[in-house]
Amino acid sequence: MADKKIKSALISVFHKDGLDDIVKKLHELDVVIYSTGGTQKFIESLGIPVERVEDLTSYPSILDGRVKTLHPKVFGGILARREEDHQAQLNQYEIPELDLVIVDLYPFEETVKSTTDESTIIEKIDIGGISLIRAAAKNFNDVVVIPSKENYEGFLQLLNEKRGITSKEERKAFALDAFKISSHYDTAIFEYFLDHKPTASFKKSFLGGKTLRYGENPHQQGVYYGELDAMFNILGGKELSFNNLVDVDAAVALMREFKDDAPTFAVLKHTNACGVATRPTVLEAWHAALAGDPISAFGGILICNSEIDLATAEEINKLFYEVLIAPSFSEEAKSLLMKKSKRILLELRHYGIQDKSFKSLLNGVIEQDTDLKGETIEHFEAKTNRKPTDQELKDLVFANKLVKHLKSNTIVLARDNQLLGMGCGQTSRVDACKQAIAKAKNFGFELENAAMASDAFFPFPDCVEIAHQAGITSVVQPGGSIKDQLSIDYCNENDLAMVFTGTRHFKH
């Protein structure tokens, strides 16, 4: 029989918010309730009778509460099939059937976030709870499992509507949630013990999957797993799409480089920055960033490291964009920008640095350290006879921040804290250099005394020669080619300054 009536329940939870209505309803339905510890006291405080697990097992809670429910009289009642042979054994050993298990888990992840004390963290590894959840979920044919407070509302509605009767499909749905929670919990513990050590096993778990309108293209399905609300206040606009999320991630990673700088604006398209500028005011930064490529800015992703004021909002509002991100918005700016109901407005809470990144490929997954390294003037090693001027050093730092966030092969041209032109995603560095120069000139920029950054070394001096002919006077690159000296020699012969960083920033 697929439908089952709940006649008995085991309840032992850490989070008791919302539990009272369920307990009262179970009592109204004449369900026998078993409990222990703090949950037992909570139920008794509601004036509802409860059977003590200690009386059932004839064992007290021992070892500071580490062992309370780990007993055959508990697990037998959960795992027994409601069939003749199992029923006979239950009767023989005086084990009551348990039709409902409401158990959650100690807050392990929250504890890891709140303390570094190992003993405190270890005590929050749940043993009895996760065993009860898995046992009840395994026996979903006969048992209902409620593994989290997130299930309370739906379960209470079911109790009210069907008065304690559940179908196999409903029990299996709760079991699915139970295994989702237990596997996520075990993964969190694994990652804590892993502590960044190399391992032969790859495990990641994210709760809260959200189905997207579609994936990268309309014929592809897409789902986002994660906690977007932890990073953003979503103030308005349509739902974020798969491509929006990818672009927003790129925008936040880029602006992280400038989070402590003067007002900086960036415009991105397909994860690549097409306009970036730092200026004394947000409005000036917006105009300078937009000037970098006003054509590509149409339908782009906009991000700023400072509050958006009304004057800037009025200018931004003249452009069609997909997403605007900033740490805050003035009330006047927010009111204006939210009138465009389809444009997404995100208030950035924090930059969400993750020290590992991964992607799926070739019937597997690759994982790496996230590229969080950034170079300042102190990291530059001058390689040419002429050393960069103070202004050139500032320009080289700015350009080098950008080159890290553009698809390889990439070249960045910058001056006075402004992106002038970029070439990215090219199969040759020469093409990237030519593309950067062409884009800069196409939008009216002169390249005299501009700086050039490259994400990887120059195998030949051709890029330096092309840049010099365009008016560029300073270059930053990782170095590391067996033919580095050829580029250095060209710079020396033509009074260019070149510095090495020693760090390559490929981005595929």
Image: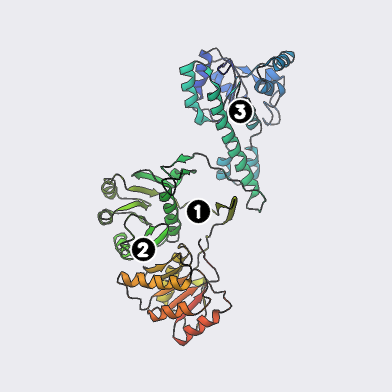
Q: Which mark is residue 111?
A: none
Relative to the observer, which residue lies in front, 177 or 283?
177
Q: Nearer the viewer, mark 1 or mark 2?
A: 2
Q: Earlier in the sequence, mark 1 or mark 3?
A: 3
Mark 3, residue position: 137
Q: Quadrant of the N terminus?
A: top right
Q: CA distance from mark 2 to mark 3?
A: 53 Å
Quadrant in the rendering for residue 104: top right
Mark 2, residue position: 275
Q: Secondary structure at mark 1?
A: loop
Quick check: 454 left or right of 262?
Answer: right
Residue 117 in sight here = no
Amino acid type shown at disc 3 = Ala
Q: Secondary structure at mark 3?
A: helix
Q: Are marks 1 and 2 in contact (CB under 8 Å)?
A: no
Mark 1, residue position: 353
- Which residue is depicted at the point 40% across and 70% down? 435
Q: Residue 372 appears at what percent x and percent y? A: 52, 60
